[in-house]
Amino acid sequence: MSQSIAVIGSGFSSLAAACYLAKAGHQVTVFEKNNTFGGRARQLKKDGFTFDIGPTWYWMPDVFERFFGDFGKKPEDYYQLIKLSPAYSVYFGKNQAITIADSLEKIKETFEQHEKGGAAKLQKFIDAALDNYNIAIKDLVYRPGISPLELITPKTAMKVGQFFSTISRDVRAAFKNPHLVAILEFPVLFLGAKPSNTPAFYNFMNYADFGLGTFHPKNGMYSVVQGMVDLAKELGAVLKNDQNVTSILVDQGKAQGIEVNGTQLFFDKVLSGADYHHTETLLPKNYRQYSEAYWTKRTFAPSSLLFYVGFEKQIQNVEHHTLFFDVPFEKHAESIYDDPKWPEEPLFYASFPSKTDDSAAPIGKEAGIFLIPLAVGIQDTPELRETYFEKIMTRFEFLTGQSVKKSIIFKESFCLNDFINDYNSYKGNAYGLANTLMQTAFLRPKLKSKKVDGLFFTGQLTVPGPGVPPSLISGKIVSGLMDQSIK
Ligand SMILES: Cc1cc2nc3c(=O)[nH]c(=O)nc-3n(C[C@H](O)[C@H](O)[C@H](O)COP(=O)(O)OP(=O)(O)OC[C@H]3O[C@@H](n4cnc5c(N)ncnc54)[C@H](O)[C@@H]3O)c2cc1C
């Protein structure tokens, strides 16, 4: 039976759910507080430059294919995908970078150069990662996180040990070269926790990295948002921006609708893709499932300090994606997770989309995005942002052997206060709730409210977790709970 459904927020999970629910015949209306759609994946345009404000790494192309395939479409019906070659590079010191090529065979050669026997060990490591990828991404992550039994299959029963070992331990058991170790530990940073606190089973991220590769959608990640918005509209969903939802209406334990910009609107069901903690604050206290103490005890994925920089010249000695791992990882990670504070010497990541995509910057110029992962809940001031910009630019110039500060046309920044103000993010988190062992699958906040009938949740704080592909999956899983005809 067709129902009216209000969707709060327009992140990837909300957009995905809007598509599935509209296709199943429901009347879906999306309410987004900001003036553009896409949630954390918005776009900044300035003086002929274009930047993705949020995600920049397009991994797991098969998940996007499966999503569009569910509607009889392909990603290329909506955007053009470019495989990055090389995928990325990682700086460990001045003029000392390891470049990751676009195929496993070439990456094996690189590993062999840095560690004797590295090629064979990498093949073995990636074979195991592929096995987990097939179990996790083709099956497990599509389960709703209701019961621990979902995780128990004949295939996972053989791998119990991998839930109790960590990525860090397994990588170090196989490789000794610290630079190769850092490269193999990097992919799980997308899951929001330290590699030493991430179950070894998540090595399927290494298969996503080396086995499948890194892609760039032409015109940036925002073109995926635009594709999903177009698809949702084609399927009959209505999308509204500048719609700040201020409460979820409940009567006798049943969701009745929402209040938006001071007006009450009535719906059969409500689905929220806004941050879970914020969504519960829209409810009367007795209808909230999780206490403040619960949220305080969670391990949140990091926040970030981001800069979007227009350079008047092209930047040398960098790839489209370049990581700066020239300072100790453990010390920076401590200041994110164990003793939250601004790191003394931050690792950082830089992206130059104009290396691949001429729509990102005017001819002869370069668009640069810089990201420093930070703890959630720490202070954010203009002075701190400036100090850290200076820190990383000085290191950037030293490591890549060029001067760039004099070539900056403009820079814009985004940090904790913006995550809170723009997205109602809990403590300014960027990537939601980390995928630690105790925050995996059925141990994550639930998709269906236990206290309010007809209220559902989706997004990076729910199952399966942080990242664009998991958000697409989250939107599909919750739709299946709301309408069992959706498979
Ligand atoms: C800086 C950054 C870099 C990242 N890099 C990558 C990457 O390279 N690759 C990758 O795969 N993932 C990356 N991620 C993670 C990925 O972007 C997220 O996991 C994903 O976009 C989250 O989607 P979501 O559906 O959970 O919702 P969100 O994107 O969080 O969207 C929630 C929406 O709800 C809206 N909202 C909140 N409150 C209300 C309200 N009261 N009323 C109406 N609307 C409301 C918000 O405005 C927002 O639009 C990155 C994230 C960030 C922040």
Image (cartoon, rainbow, N blue to C red):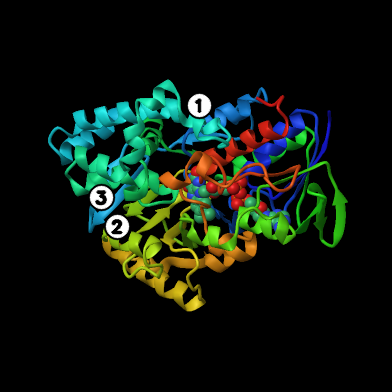
CA distance for labels 3 and 2: 16 Å
Which residue is nearer to you in this view: 314 or 221?
Answer: 221
Q: Nearer the viewer, residue 402 or 456?
A: 456
Q: Quadrant of the C terminus?
A: top right
| Label annotation for residue 97 | 3
Q: Is residue 114 left or right of residue 239?
A: left
Q: Quadrant of residue 315?
A: bottom left
Q: Amino acid at mark 1?
A: Asp
Q: Is residue 344 above or below residue 473?
A: below
**Left or right, 173 with reference to 9:** left
Residues packed near mark 1 inside 10 Å, few (<14), some (14 to 19) or many (20 plus): few
Residue 73, horizontal then vertical, whole percent: 65, 25
- Say which residue label 2 marks: 329
- Between discs 2 and 1, the one toward the N terminus: 1
Question: Cβ–Cβ below 8 Å for labels 3 and 2?
Answer: no
The answer to whether the residue labelled 1 contacts the one labelled 3, judged by CB atoms less than 8 Å apart, is no
Which of the two residues, 298 or 420, is positioned nearer the viewer here?
Answer: 298
Q: Residue at x 51, y 76 (%)?
A: 382
Q: Amino acid at mark 2?
A: Phe
